[in-house]
Structures are given as structure tokens and as C-alpha cells.
Image (cartoon, helix red, strand yellow):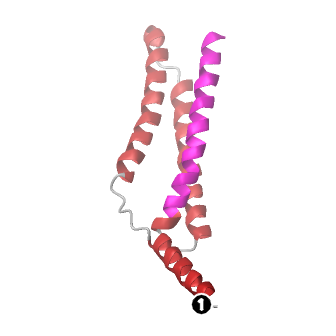
Amino acid sequence: MKSAMILYFVSGVMGFFILSMMAVGLDFGCEVSYPVPANNASGLMLAYSQLLSTAQIVAASFILTSSGDTSVSKYWKKLRSIITVTIFTASIATGMLCSTFVKQDLRKARIDAKKSIVSKLDVDAT
């Protein structure tokens, strides 16, 4: 029971921070892929993230429910939990590493800034 409470607490904290980062990531993805409409870019990003999450959950379920040899079952129980956590951690680390190589060319922000300056000049001229 104690380990389940720890799991629920850690899952809640991770979910809180991951969901807030998701909005920033979607906005940044739409900025980087500017000529593509925002609906298409965010839809593809969400679809890929759900596909990857489903694949990770299936892999984790397979690892956690596989029985292993009975003579080493005590060690296998600990090892399969470590393998599952390592897979999730490696996927997060890979995403963080890949995001460092993304060029921050915020074309949409520049175009929006130019539009706001032009519209401000039009309002001042009238």
C-alpha cells in the first residue's frame, strides 16, 4: 500500500509538470513549422505523442507481466521494473536531446510583430 501511494504521488507530480510543458511544446512546434497551419502541426504532434505513448505502455506491460525463470524470479521482479523505468527515462532524455538541436527560427512571431506594428501605424495615421 505504501508503494502504491508513492506511485500515485510521483505520477501526479509528473503529470502536473508534463501537461504544462505540453502546451509550451505545442506552441513552439507550431512556431517552428510556421508555413504549415497550426491545426495540422499540433494534430500531427499529438498523434505522434499518443502513438509513442501507446507503444511504450505496450512494451512496459509486456516487460512487467513476463514471468522469467523461476529460479531467478526474485531478481527478475526488480530487474523488470528497472528496465521499464529505464525505457521511459531514455525516451524523455532522447526527446530533450533532440530538442536542443532544433533551430529557433520563430518566423510566425516575427510576422505577427510586423503586422502589429503596421496596424498600430494605421491606427495612428487615422
Q: What's under tag 1, amino acid-wise?
A: Ala
Would you say the magenta stretch is mainly helix, strand or loop?
Answer: helix
Magenta segment includes 15 = yes
Residue 26 image position (x, y, % from top left): 55, 57
Magenta segment includes 16 = yes
Residue 81 image position (x, y, % from top left): 49, 22
Residue 34 in view = no
SS label for mark 1: helix
Mark 1 surroundings within 10 Å by alpha-carbon count, few (fewer than 14), some (14 through 19), many (20 or more): few
Residue 54 image position (x, y, % from top left): 58, 44
Q: Which residues are magenta?
A: 1-29
**From the viewer's perspective, is 15 left or right of 59?**
right
Residue at x-position 38% and y-position 62%: 104
The outermost residue toward the left is 101
Residue 33 in view = yes
Image quadrant assignment for residue 16: top right
Q: Label 1, on which residue? A: 125
- In this orientation, which residue lies closer to the viewer: 38 or 84? 38
- In this orientation, which residue lies closer to the viewer: 117 or 61? 117
**From the viewer's perspective, is 23 left or right of 102?**
right
The outermost residue toward the bottom is 126
- In this orientation, which residue lies closer to the viewer: 70 or 109? 109
Q: Quadrant of the image for the N terminus?
A: top right
Residue 110 image position (x, y, % from top left): 46, 73
Residue at x-position 52% and y-position 65%: 30
Residue at x-position 49% and y-position 72%: 108
Residue at x-position 49% and y-position 16%: 77
Q: Quadrant of the image for the C terminus?
A: bottom right
In the rendered view, would you say 13 is above or below 39? above
- In this orientation, which residue lies closer to the viewer: 45 or 13? 13
In the rendered view, would you say 70 is above or below 67? above
Image label count:
1
